[in-house]
Image (cartoon, grey):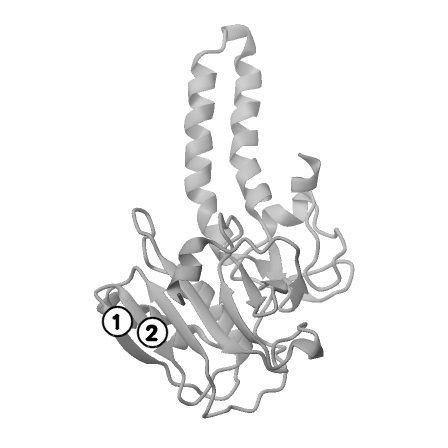
Amino acid sequence: MARFLTKECPHCHEDSFGWRQLVSLDYFSPYECKACGKLVRNDGFRQFLVIPTILVTLFVGIVLFASLPDSLEPFGLVLLLVLVALPVIILAKPVKLDSKSDLAPFTPDPDNDKVIVVKGWNEDELQRILDDFVAEDSSGVASYKIEVEKRDEDLHRLTFPQDIHAALFGFLVNYLAYPTNFALAGRSIMVAGKTMLRSDFQGIPESLVGNKAIIYLPENDQDYDVIYLQTETGDTFANSFSEGVWREVKDARLSSEVKMLFG
């Protein structure tokens, strides 16, 4: 449990956020890391999960409280308070104030081969998601255009005639799977991108630049802010949006459904 009560800074990777800092960490307000002084905020998706998690834990706590003998009721009240505080602390995750603010240099290539295939959204839903993504983009990099080709009722192919920065390309793959203002319950969303690697893929070894790669959500994803990349040579990398850099991993976590999107 102790490791959940301390979180590391996404900038300096020091365990500088104890439970007191995590309780006050907020998505809408910047917070300064006491180790490096850089600004962070709470992960938005995790903060969104706090209220429903508290409601569930309170329900469990009330059930337990009702079963306690009278002599233990004071301990039951303490338990209820703990059950309210724990989700706030455990779900809190410090992320960089703007994970798109320090992107690698980028020169758009009109002849780029970037493509995203997404399955599970209808045409109207997909357009709303893309409009929201563009509206929320604060990266300041070169403007881009997203063209949508309908392949089936819920299968679409996205291309980028003016090109798009590698980081935004990855953000979009993730956003199509976890868009804001859309309920995901009962849906099966599959999304993956494919492109040739360039120097704006921060953290990818120079020896792999020029290789084809697919970008996807890892199988059994529990983080919601991580994407994976696998090259045609079999090298696999993961990119957490709190860091913004590709790091090599051993487990590809590549599902057969994702493979079928480009099969």
Q: Residues within 10 Å of mark 2 (few under 14, many from 20)?
A: some
**Disc 2 target residue:** 157
Assess whether mark 1 and mark 2 are in contact (beta carbons under 8 angstroms): yes
Q: Residues within 10 Å of mark 1 (few under 14, many from 20)?
A: few
Query: Residue 217, position in %: x, y?
Result: 49, 59
Q: Residue at x 28, y 66 (%)?
A: 155
Query: Residue 119, position in %: x, y?
Result: 32, 62
Q: Is residue 131 visible?
A: no
Placement of 113 over or under 89, stated as above or below:
below
Element carrying mark 1: strand
Query: Residue 83, position in %: x, y?
Result: 53, 31
Horizontal placement of 163 versus 121: left or right?
Answer: right
Q: Residue at x 40, y 63 (%)?
A: 191
Depth check, front residue: 26 or 108? 108
Query: Residue 247, position in %: x, y?
Result: 67, 64
Q: Residue at x 46, y 37 (%)?
A: 54
Number of the label disc, if any, that sits on residue 151: 1
Placement of 155 over or under 160, stated as above or below:
above
Quarter of the picture holding the N terminus: top right
Horizontal placement of 44 versus 185: left or right?
Answer: right
Q: Is residue 141 visible?
A: yes
Number of the label disc, if any, that sits on residue 206: none
Depth check, front residue: 103 or 210? 210
Element carrying mark 2: strand
Compute the Cα span from label 2 to label 1: 7 Å
Quarter of the picture holding the C terminus: bottom left
Q: Residue at x 52, y 84 (%)?
A: 140
The kind of residue on which mark 1 rests is Arg
Nearer-N-terminus badge (2/1): 1
Quadrant of res 246: bottom right
